[in-house]
Image (tube, grey):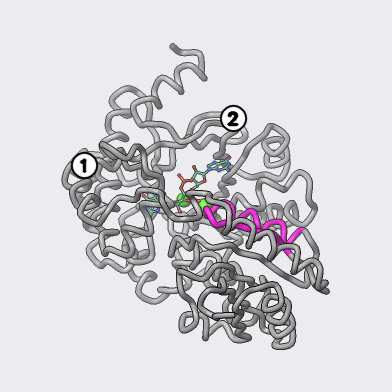
């Protein structure tokens, strides 16, 4: 059989023998398989056209979560299978993480892995390739770089606002600004499309400035309407090393005569680790200007206590992947509990994201978490709807 006509499959597992074993099954199932046992080789063998990637979640160096994140950022459209030797709950959250990133998860395998289990998943993949699912053929119409530049010029990017409330009192404290692109012909585009484009096309700074400026404008509008809120804006890795960021943020606030406490910047744990020395300088300058700093997706990266201690954060945002499971899974609950205790010891506030039901809300209250954000409270909404939402909720309409 001609090798090029076979769908290709990549296995990333630090156990060389495991890689060989899965390769064998894959070859016998009709794939052309490659396996690597060292994640540093990943970039050299990775190709966006790979049909199936099988990744071990726990490896030295770069772990499976980072690989998944890389694939999400690259908008990888192939199938993914995750494996691990740990208990099934770890696999389960890895799968949810991948789903949240819009990746196509075919299934999960826990070690020891049986021949039939691998084959069953791979046959499922083959079945999918032969059906004419348009999403698999990549026929979604995506905006181009030219569209993006035009969109920036026409100010088509909007900060959708998701409320954050005080868990003890129920009071609305602020919002997180989440980008949406109100595209004139393709409809509303979400961050899974927007963010990788902005990163790959070198337009992230421009996008962030637009988000910051528009968000600050809304804070002013709400303040004039009698609602004093704090808004958080997400800052990506490339922008956090932009030396002009502190002055720029300051200038937006001053233009609207707003004190700095109205704005917070969210930086992911991942970002911070990658750029620690440069970003520490900028983060410190932001903090000196009294801009609040929030560490995002906490629990998904590898920050140590030392790193947390060195960086001038005022708040920890606990990742949705374990907040959403805290009521039913003791491991997830333990992480939430420990994070709250740690944050309070370090004089930081805790925000739980992804709160989807009242049981989670009750548990967070019991554990002493400060702020909640999630679908249970509200989904991200167009900024012009926020005042009405708050009025309807607090009965002051
Ligand atoms: P994030 O910072 O972790 O933002 C939270 C995401 O979780 C948002 O997705 C939000 O809509 C979603 N979410 C909130 N509550 C719930 C819930 O209860 N359940 C579930 N299932 N999901 C919930 P969204 O808006 O699609 O944003 C995705 C990611 O894109 C954000 O994750 C953030 O990392 C990035 N992003 C969004 N806007 C910007 C931006 O302006 N700049 C940068 N650099 N990144 C952005
Ligand atoms: Ca965020
Ligand atoms: Ca987050």
Whichever of callouts 2 and 1 sits on the residue coming sooner in the sequence is: 1
Q: Is residue 90 part of the magenta span, yes or no?
A: yes
Q: Is residue 80 part of the magenta span, yes or no?
A: no
Residue 254 occupies which quadrant of the picture? top left
The residue lying at 69 percent from left, 82 percent from top is 19
Judged left or right of residue 98, residue 247 is left
Q: Determine the CA span between mark 2 and mark 1.
A: 37 Å
The residue lying at 71 percent from left, 48 percent from top is 325
Pointer 1 residue: 155
Judged left or right of residue 315, residue 124 is right
Q: Which residues are magenta?
A: 89-108
Q: Residues within 10 Å of mark 2 (few under 14, many from 20)?
A: few
Residue 235 occupies which quadrant of the picture? bottom left
**Above or below, 79 relative to 369:** below
Image position, residue 310 (x, y; %): 48, 70
Q: Secondary structure at mark 1?
A: loop
Pointer 2 residue: 169
Image position, residue 144 (x, y; %): 27, 54
Q: Is residue 292 visible?
A: no
Q: Secondary structure at mark 2?
A: loop
Q: Is mark 2 within 8 Å of ligand 1?
A: no
The one of 96 and 332 positioned closer to us in this rendering: 96
- Name the dominant secondary structure of the magenta segment: helix
The residue lying at 55 percent from left, 55 percent from top is 347
Image position, residue 87 (x, y; %): 80, 64
Judged left or right of residue 25, residue 319 is left
Image position, residue 252 (x, y; %): 22, 46
The one of 274 and 186 positioned closer to us in this rendering: 186
Q: Quadrant of the N terminus?
A: bottom right
The one of 284 and 209 positioned closer to us in this rendering: 209
């Amino acid at each position: 059989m001609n090798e090029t006509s076979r769908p290709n499959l990549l296995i990333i597992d630090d156990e060389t023998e495991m890689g060989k074993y899965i390769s064998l099954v894959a070859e016998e199932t009709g794939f052309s398989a490659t396996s690597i046992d060292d994640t540093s080789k990943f970039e050299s063998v990775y190709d966006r056209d790979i049909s199936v990637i099988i990744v071990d979640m726990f490896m030295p160096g770069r772990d499976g979560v980072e690989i998944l994140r890389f694939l999400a950022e690259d908008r990888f459209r192939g199938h993914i299978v995750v494996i691990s030797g740990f208990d099934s709950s770890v696999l389960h959250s890895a799968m949810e993480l991948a789903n949240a990133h819009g990746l196509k998860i075919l299934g999960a395998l826990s070690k020891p892995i049986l021949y039939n289990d691998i084959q069953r998943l791979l046959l499922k993949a083959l079945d999918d390739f032969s059906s004419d699912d348009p999403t698999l053929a990549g026929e979604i119409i995506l905006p181009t770089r030219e569209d993006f530049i035009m969109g920036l010029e026409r100010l088509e990017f909007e900060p959708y606002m998701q409320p954050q409330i005080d868990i003890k009192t129920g009071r609305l404290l602020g919002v997180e600004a989440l980008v949406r692109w109100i595209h004139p012909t393709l409809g509303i585009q979400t961050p899974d499309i927007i963010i990788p484009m902005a990163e790959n096309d070198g337009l992230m700074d421009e996008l962030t400035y637009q988000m910051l400026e528009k968000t600050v404008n809304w804070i002013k509008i709400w303040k004039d309407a009698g609602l004093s809120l704090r808004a958080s804006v997400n800052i990506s890795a490339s922008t956090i090393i932009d030396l002009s960021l502190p002055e720029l943020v300051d200038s937006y606030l001053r233009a609207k005569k707003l004190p700095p406490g109205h704005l917070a910047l969210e930086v992911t744990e991942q970002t911070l680790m990658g750029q620690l020395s440069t970003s520490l300088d900028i983060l410190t300058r932001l903090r000196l200007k009294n801009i609040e700093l929030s560490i995002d997706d906490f629990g998904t990266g590898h920050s140590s206590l030392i790193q947390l201690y060195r960086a001038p954060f005022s708040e920890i945002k606990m990742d949705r992947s374990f907040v959403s499971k805290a009521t039913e899974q003791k491991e997830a609950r333990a992480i939430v509990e420990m994070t709250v205790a740690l944050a309070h010891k370090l004089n930081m506030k805790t925000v739980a994201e992804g709160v989807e039901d009242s049981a989670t809300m009750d548990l967070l209250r019991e554990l002493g978490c400060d702020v909640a954000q999630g679908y249970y409270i509200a989904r991200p909404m167009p900024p012009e709807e926020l005042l009405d939402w708050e009025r309807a909720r607090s009965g002051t309409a």
